Amino acid sequence: MQTTESDGNDTPLYAPARKLALSAPFGWLKLGWRDFRRAPWHSLTYGAIFVLIGWALLYLAWIESNDALVFSLLFGFLLVGPALTFGLYDISHQLELNRKPSFRHERQKVFHEMGHELMFALILSMLFLILAIVVSMVMWTEPTAAQLTVSPAVSVAAVVSVSSAVSLLIAVIFAGMAFCASAFALPMILHQDTDATTALLTSINAVLRNIKVMALWALIIFVLTAAGFATGLIGLAFIVPVLGYATWHAYRQTILVKDKE
């Protein structure tokens, strides 16, 4: 690992990362689909959990007639999704070790790393909360009578269009920040039993070292997640497990660390 010197001791700062080929994300998806086929029932169980959570959130947005919340949910899945797929990483790890996946082992890993997971999830949840608040404020902004009087050429439609564009830009910025921090963090926590700070720094370093590749990976995740939403979230039952497994393989091919087992 890269280190920083403090009081004469070398303290791990972050793990180094490989330089990836632009085609790497497609290989990760292929491996993710392979793991899905090797553990279909485990995969669909986690996928169903995501669908149920999504339906619950959409129902809350519907009864509140809150379009801003619906808009934030798509990006929210990108923000907090990695924290909810910890069990999927363990399935891929067990398959990698030629072991039969079990919910018991996945549960044990979750509880074993609970402290690091909670710290990581707290950071992503705070980002999601800030995102939802900011987007809501922007999307609920409407032109006042005074504004229309001063500038009659400005139409309500134009103001709404600008508000939507600003909301999209804000969401993209927040999602980008969260993606850099989470792309490899949780798989590293599971694999190396490392602290949240080291995992976050490792993830950020790896993303910055492979900006084009990771931008493509983020786009693939976004498109597949959007496709899942377009199917009434049912598609997420398949998409989420594949992306979770693919994320594990992305970590294994990118982050230079030694196996602990």
Image (tube, rainbow, N blue to C red):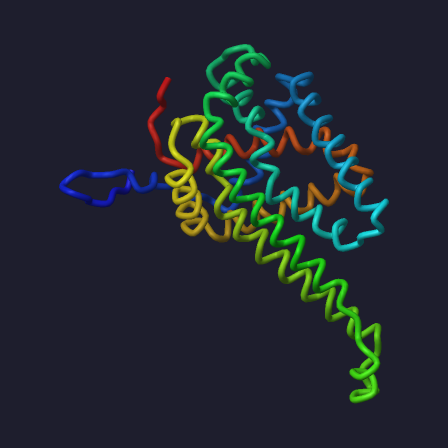
State the quadrant of the C terminus.
top left
> Which residue of the protein is positioned furthest toward the left in this rendering?
8
On the image, the x and y values in percent for residue 177 come to 52, 52
Total marks drawn? 0
On the image, the x and y values in percent for residue 89 come to 53, 26
Q: Which residue is drawn at 41% across and 50% down?
A: 209
Q: Residue at x 43, y 47 (%)?
A: 204
On the image, the x and y values in percent for residue 185 come to 46, 37
> Which residue of the protein is positioned furthest toward the bottom in this rendering?
150
The quadrant where residue 142 appears: bottom right
The quadrant where residue 116 appears: top left
The quadrant where residue 173 appears: bottom right
State the quadrant of the N terminus.
top left
Q: Residue at x 69, y 21 (%)?
A: 45
Q: Relative to residue 175, is residue 137 depicted above or below?
A: below
Q: Relative to residue 237, is residue 77 depicted above or below?
A: below
